[in-house]
Image: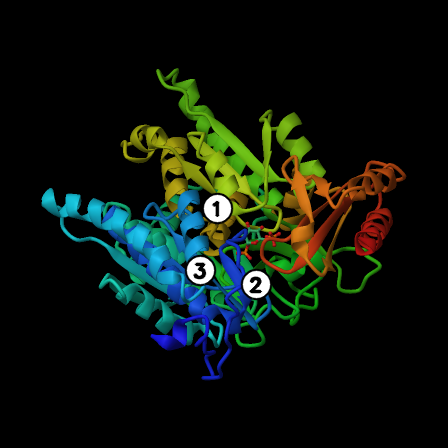
Amino acid sequence: PSEFTRAGNTTHTGEKFPIPDDEKFSYGTAGFRFDAKKLPFLVFRCAYVASLRARQLNSAIGVMITASHNPEEDNGVKLVDPSGDMLNGQWEKYATEIVNASDAELPSAVAALEKQMSQIEKSFIARGLVQNARVVCGMDTRVTGPHLMSAASQGSALFSVRFENIGVVSTPILHYIVKSHNFPQFANPTLHGYYTAIKEAFMELYMETEEPEGSRYQPKVIVDCANGVGAPRFRDLMKEIPSDYLEVEFRNENGRLNHQCGADFVKIKQELPENFDGIQEPKSASFDGDADRLIYFRSKKGAEKPRAAELFDGDKIACLYAMYIQEQLKAYHETKPTYNIDMGIVQTAYANGASTRFIRDTLKMKPIIVKTGVKYLHEEASEFDIGIYFEANGHGTVVFSSHFDSIIRRHPQTLVPLRRLALFSRVINETVGDAFADLLAVEICLRHYGWSMDDWAEKLYRDVPSHQVKVDVAKREDFETTNAEQTLVKPIGLQEEIDKTVAKYKESRAFVRPSGTENIVRVYAEADTLENAIELGETLKKIVLKY
Ligand code: G16
């Protein structure tokens, strides 16, 4: 239909917003993400690519319409593979080619792809396999979502692939439902199937958890929903869990999306979100707009800045999980089993230096650092039987191998620690970082240790002071990195200036990288004091702006 061509691109208000044939788009850290006005033709074409992928694999493929932590005016689209993981790299390339074709080039761009697909499809039909191809599509709470949903529906209808609109859901719910369609033993492929699976695992694990004597654990969390999808969907889930297991108070449910609140705001500003004043809020947590990130926080004691927050970010969550899993796993290894179960932790360059040292020196594990982007972390974590991955911004989960599945998860266990391990792996949403599932898993760990927030803060490690800055630049494409994004190779000369500046500060570390989701460059700096970390970060910002 003409309204979803480049030339006919029309926004949700019906206004024409043509996209020039030479405007190019790239599949970034988390799919295509831009000003929502550009999205209709993009979503249409991506859903069409998703339908081809669905036909190729005779499976359900996901399309998620979200711009997550970005401002409300943006929107985005990302595709989810049958396993519930991010889209396969080769298909990211196909999607990019299809999206970047001009209107005139489009028919020939798709013809080649379609030819390949129909040959594969014929082989399915010849082998008598049922038609499982379908596109499952969800959206976040953005006002532009429904129009984009209709673009997706029309895109996947081009070749009569079944389309399922699952409405307003978190990104992790969409991933979970896609996986459930393709692996029916996983869960029922519905919203209710997701709630039931997570609730049941949480409640069973709760019963297997004993609070130690003198426990200071408090079964209450105040949740900042970022005015996003976390508000309705986490409310649904918590209706299934009795409040004496865990009480949740909801805040920031209906205001402006991600504005002065949400996990990204709290992490970058290290500040309390709107509607939190730090008084009588002992344990709080923030989701982001599509609820795939989780950061715990509380008011920072003795800080000069009035609304300063102390963060319990992705690194602190990863270390808490690692400690807990290691402890349960010890029981398995003490039985002198034939098979080893190995475990690893994956982080990015944003991981606080103190967390990386804790993993190495206390947990005696080798931390692995990869590029920003869940797909890179997920891939690396999948090398282990138990792979924990977290970005400091709160995006992360734990993945389990088929080896783990057969000897722990699907095997009846007599030892309590192993039953805990099996249940923990079911509370977690291993398809992708899930703020709801992660919050429930954190609460289980804190209850198991009998920890208050004070305990969590003191018993792992103290963060080294850090500062993050977003720098508006004309073209983020001018910045290129290497070394897991810790070293710039372009613009020429900038890295040397960064190195010289960093060397002037004690216990310092810093890097500059282009964002894959916003048109900005990010600066990360650590130093011996917060003042110095801020000064270093702001100095680097000025240097970046010169280029
Ligand atoms: C997305 C990705 C994350 C990434 C974040 C920021 O998160 O899923 O892996 O850390 O963007 O990426 P960048 O620094 O490249 O802008 P979300 O929560 O926005 O989907």
Check disc 1 and report the residue beneath it: 444
Amino acid, disc 3 = Ala
At mark 1, the secondary structure is: helix
Q: CA distance from mark 2 to mark 3?
A: 47 Å
The N terminus: image quadrant = bottom left
Amino acid, disc 1 = Ile
Q: Earlier in the sequence, mark 2 or mark 3?
A: 3
At mark 2, the secondary structure is: strand
User: Residue lying farthest bottom?
Assistant: 14
Q: Nearer the viewer, residue 253 or 298?
A: 253
Asked whether mark 1 lies closer than 8 Å to ligand 1, one says no
Q: Residue at x 41, y 44 (%)?
A: 90
Residue 544 in the image, given as x and y percentages of width and height: 79, 52
Q: Residue at x 46, y 40 (%)?
A: 398
Instruction: Judge from the rendering whether residue 308 lies leftward or rightward of residue 161; answer left or right.
Output: right
Amino acid, disc 2 = Ile
**What number is the disc on residue 222?**
2
Instruction: Judge from the rendering whether residue 345 lies leftward or rightward of residue 175; answer left or right.
Output: right
User: Residue lying farthest right?
Assistant: 504
At mark 3, the secondary structure is: loop
Q: Residue at x 59, y 41 (%)?
A: 371
